[in-house]
Image (cartoon, rainbow, N blue to C red):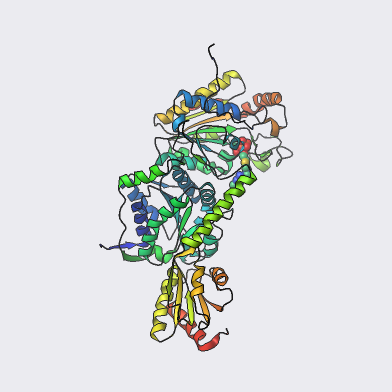
Amino acid sequence: MNAVYTRTKTLNGNLLGFCPGCMHGTVFKLIGEVLEELNIDGRTACILGIGCCGLAQEVVSYDLATAPHGRACAVASGLKRSNPDTVVFTYQGDGDLASIGLAETLHAANRGENITTIFINNGIYGMTGGQMAPTTLVGMKATTAPDGRDPGLHGYPLHMCEILNQLTAPVYLERVSCNNPANVRKTKNAIRKAFQNQLDGKGYSMVEVVTSCPTNWGLSPEKSLQFLEDNMLREFPLGVLRDR
Amino acid sequence: MKKVFMKGCEAIAEAAVRAGARFYAGYPITPQNEIPEYMSRRMPQVGGVFLQGESEIASVTMVYGAGAGGTRAMTSSSSVGISLKSEGISYCAGARVPMVYVNMQRGGPGVGTIQAAQQDYFQATRASGNGGFKMIVLAPATVQEAVDMTYRAFDLAERDRNPVLILGDGVLGTIMEPVVLPEMKSDEEVAALKQKNRDWAIVGHSREEKRGFIDPGYWSTDMQEAHCVSLNEMYERWQREDVQVEELYLEDAELVFVAYGTSARIAKSALKLLRAEGHRVGMIRPLTVSPFPAASFDKIDYARCKCVLDIEMSIPAQMIYDVELALRERCAVETCLRSGGNLIERDDVVKKAHEILKGGVER
Ligand SMILES: Cc1ncc(C[n+]2csc(CCOP(=O)(O)OP(=O)(O)O)c2C)c(N)n1
């Protein structure tokens, strides 16, 4: 019998601790497949943000360091500059990358660090239990915005791809989602491109993946997908913002 | 040996390069700007990396990344900037990432003054970040000592996979003195040092190898506790093996000075004057303020010694808590202090000593 589909060898078989309907697992699978296909998983280091992604620490086979909350791009800058042959990527949530780590993200992108960033935008602080994130939609409820995000109090959602698109240095910025099989395939292609850019020495690439958080959105996995399509993707339209 | 005339900050930077440091990141702050400025010129000459971070937080985190990749890495700052670095320092201590950093202390809380002070002793020895970790803290008093300690700091950091702090002040950073520089490690030696770290560094390991895993925390309380216990064993080992101290005239001393860094230099000149006058004054000068040289206090003859004088450029006195712990009430403790960036004068120390020796202090 011919195997037509196998699990990527970069997932070591340990149990994934993500909630049902969460897309972190899908994204780690896609990253693993890309690393294997490019034959670089043996020279890759992942810099994890602080957040639900921490649950992947013991699940992936490649080298890994956990960054201080928000600082993954600074860790990656230090590592990549001193080990140019190592493939370095950061994996960060929206609280991590766009709130506490906004400065580190922006400046690493602005320096054109030759690294790859995978940015998981689920519109909420997942790990800590559903507090408001910089990407929380207007009107969307969070445990620290019980009446929903109020622009008068909290301002508006941050659009990281658009913000980084103001900078000269980044080479690749794309926003994708994993809400259906076609988009999962697009996400994989985007991830591949973001790593290929690094291999080609081109500079900073970021793939923003708009995802759901059924647990903290208070919706079933199915309803979360609907919410994502009706609301998240309206605020965060998918597409390539830059490809140089 | 050839001597060169160098500024403290630049000599420290050169010593770091000679010790094999190939990564430096920092953010401007007086009185240590000459370190990043020197590194920005020097690192490219030796195939190293200089990065000006967007903040102290980013800079120390870059060092965490470079250190996690096995490269000898360094950062530096002054007081308020060190506060911002405390997150990254704590991460290095938790995740066992070697790193060396310098604090050229300035005066007072907040932004304080830019002049020399020793207001960060608590921070340096007690709480350089969250989590109750400790570090070896080296306290040079001269540019030569700063050079020698910096050179050694990288070996200590790598031996322990822990941060090492060079605790200086504005005087040490800006003073110019003749120094003998340590030997420059060859490219081959530097590469070999990095290769030694490959086992645990996150440089990319194949699936057949054990992966590099840099983890500043644990999901399991028992694992975290075991980690803290093993760190504590290391701290206790330092107390037995890594204390460095200069002891002067403890056998006959009726009065013992305790001072480190620039204060110690001033105290020593007061001591010379007092001994020439015939006064029996001794001195304990910690070269490591952590681990603190507590055992030196057992060498004092308390049948003769009336008093220990704690001399610091800090108000309130901070080292005094270590002094009192080591003394265990075997004699009185007095202080001679300045703060805010004002230097202690030799004559302040002499005057205070005269008062004490005249019997102004009860045993
Ligand atoms: C300095 C610091 N502040 C706060 C926290 C607590 N904390 C842990 S995870 C997290 C939020 C993560 O949210 P996000 O980045 O959106 O990722 P998600 O969990 O949603 O995937 C916070 C605030 C921390 N670990 N460190």
Instruction: Dividing the image into four quarters, tell me where ligand 1 lies.
Output: top right
Q: Nearer the viewer, residue A94 or B282?
A: B282
**Relative to B26, does residue A188 appear above or below in the rendering?**
above
Q: Residue at x 43, y 78 (%)?
A: B249
Q: Is residue A70 left or right of residue B190?
A: right
Relative depth, front residue between B16 and B304: B304
In the figure, residue A181 lies in which quadrant?
A: top right
Percent x, y of residue B178: 30, 65
Q: Residue at x 55, y 45 (%)?
A: B216
Residue A55 seen in the figure? yes
Frontmost residue, A122 versus A162 = A122
| Left or right placement of residue A124 versus residue A109 in this view | right
Question: Is the residue A218 above or below the residue B7 in the image?
Answer: above
Q: Residue furthest left?
A: B2
Which quadrant would the N terminus of chain A be assigned to in this image? top right
Left or right placement of residue B177 versus residue A174 in this view: left
- Give percent across and percent down for residue A45: 48, 35
Q: Residue A164 placed where, x, y %?
A: 50, 35
Question: Quadrant where the C terminus of chain A lies?
Answer: top left
Residue furthest to the bottom in view is: B358
Q: How many labels does the image show?
A: 0
Q: Is residue B266 left or right of residue B356?
A: left
| Residue A106 in picture, x, y percent from top left | 50, 40
Q: Is residue B312 visible to the viewer in this orientation of the structure? A: no
Q: Which of the pair A217/B130 is nearer the observer? A: B130
Residue, far right: A147
Q: Residue at x 35, y 64 (%)?
A: B144
Determine whether B49 is above or below A31 in the image: below
